[in-house]
Every structure is written in structure tokens, then in C-alpha cells.
Amino acid sequence: MMRINMLQLIEGAKQAEGLTVIIDVFRAFSLECYLHDMGVKEIRPVGSIEDAFRLNELIPGSVLVGERGGKKCEGFDYGNSPSSVSPDHVAGKTIIHTTSAGTQGIVNAQNATEIITGSLVNAKAIVQYIKSRKPEVVSIVSMGTAGTRTNPEDELCAEYLKSLLEGNELPDIEERIAGLRTNGGEHFFDPDRQEIFPEADYWMCIKYNQFPFVIRIEKDELGFVAVKQEI
């Protein structure tokens, strides 16, 4: 029997063990799926802005992507917005990615035996991958907002993954995802915040089960690498 641990935030990432899913729906790990779909060479998640700049110097032509408080980091090429990325600019490139929630989960999950990212856009692929690995323990970590407070979208994604792992569909998944518009995703519809949270990002991040791959976290001499693996 597979034991499923449901955890939250940075503290939850620190407690994670076994095969660990780090969830960030709005927007880090939805964005990484779109980046892989755009044909990037690789994605390198890092914890700090300083580490991102350092890695950028080591990898000529790499593209800096990331946010703090939702806003694009100063000096970066892109923020955490999938609708704002130019496919022509990132295809074949190394992406260096840092966020205030998702990538913090990766760097803090030091007790995990394996890490994959979690989002709605590839939820069923995640479940298929986990079942193929047959782990004794699965830790599902909802990173929430800034890794410090829970949010509806990551909690829903976690519940959806758990339900699918247990062999059950969530019968109201479409309605619950639609409900994120006013409970979790309302900032994407604020006309005064469109520069930071474009409405198009919301629609891209809630397109559940559209990508048939997972993103596995590996490590080499330069740090973490988020690798696409087809299912």
C-alpha cells in the first residue's frame, strides 16, 4: 500500500519524504510545463535571486525567469507569467527559474528520495508516473502563497492528485477549478494588476490535464535541473 502524506508550505517541504510532489499552480510549475512545451533546452530551479544571477553568468545565453511577490525580479528577462514568455526567445535555451513558493519547495525538500513538480496542467500524467514508480511513500506538498500561507488552487491540486492516486475521480473537478476564478485566482482579473498578473495566465494555469509529461528534478554539478519526462 502506498502511504500518502499531505503537507503544506515550506515547512511541509522540509518534512517531505519518499517520492515528493511540489505543487505550485499559480504559476511556477504551470509555467515550467509551458516552457518545456515551448522547447526550452532545460530549466534550472534555484532558491535565491543571487544564485540565479550567479548561474546566469556560468551559462552563456541563459534566460532569467522569476518573481518575488508576483513581480518580475529586477534584471530578469521574464516574470513568472506563462502568457508573457516569447517562445522564440526561450526555445533551445537554458531557463534559470526562481520563485517565492514553488522553487523554494524544491530546495527545501532535502529528505525526499525523488522530486517532481505539481500543477493542474499535467495532473493525470503526474499520477500515472507515480503509479509506475510504485513508491512506498508519496509526499504531496502544497506550496501556497510565498510558501507561508495556504491557497485554494494548490490545495485543490493536492486533493485532486490524492483522489486520482486512490483510484477516484473528483466528480466536481470542473466546477471546483472554475471556482478558482473568485477564490484563489481573483487577482488575475484585477484591471490594476494586469502587468503582474495577466488574465491570460489564469486561463493557462487552469487547463487541467493538457500535458502528457511530468517534470522531474535532478541534480548535477551546477545544481537542480527540471527535466521533462513523457508519460
Image (cartoon, grey):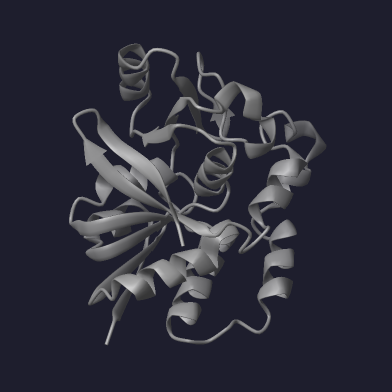
The total number of labels drawn is 0
Q: Position of residue 63 (x, y in %)?
A: 48, 21
Q: Is residue 176 left or right of residue 5?
A: right
Q: Position of residue 167 (x, y in %)?
A: 48, 87
**Residue 155 visible in this rendered orientation of the protein:** no
- In this picture, is 121 found above or below 91? below
Q: Residue at x 66, y 75 (%)?
A: 173
* 39 or 207, nearer to the observer: 39
Q: Position of residue 136 (x, y in %)?
A: 22, 77
Q: Position of residue 162 (x, y in %)?
A: 44, 76
The N terminus - image quarter: bottom left
Q: Is residue 215 left or right of residue 58?
A: right
* 197 or 160, nearer to the observer: 160
Q: Is residue 192 left or right of residue 138?
A: right
Q: Residue at x 24, y 54 (%)?
A: 14
- In this picture, is 59 found above or below 200? above
**Res 138 quadrant in image:** bottom left
Q: Residue at x 72, y 28 (%)?
A: 195
Q: Residue at x 49, y 30 (%)?
A: 66
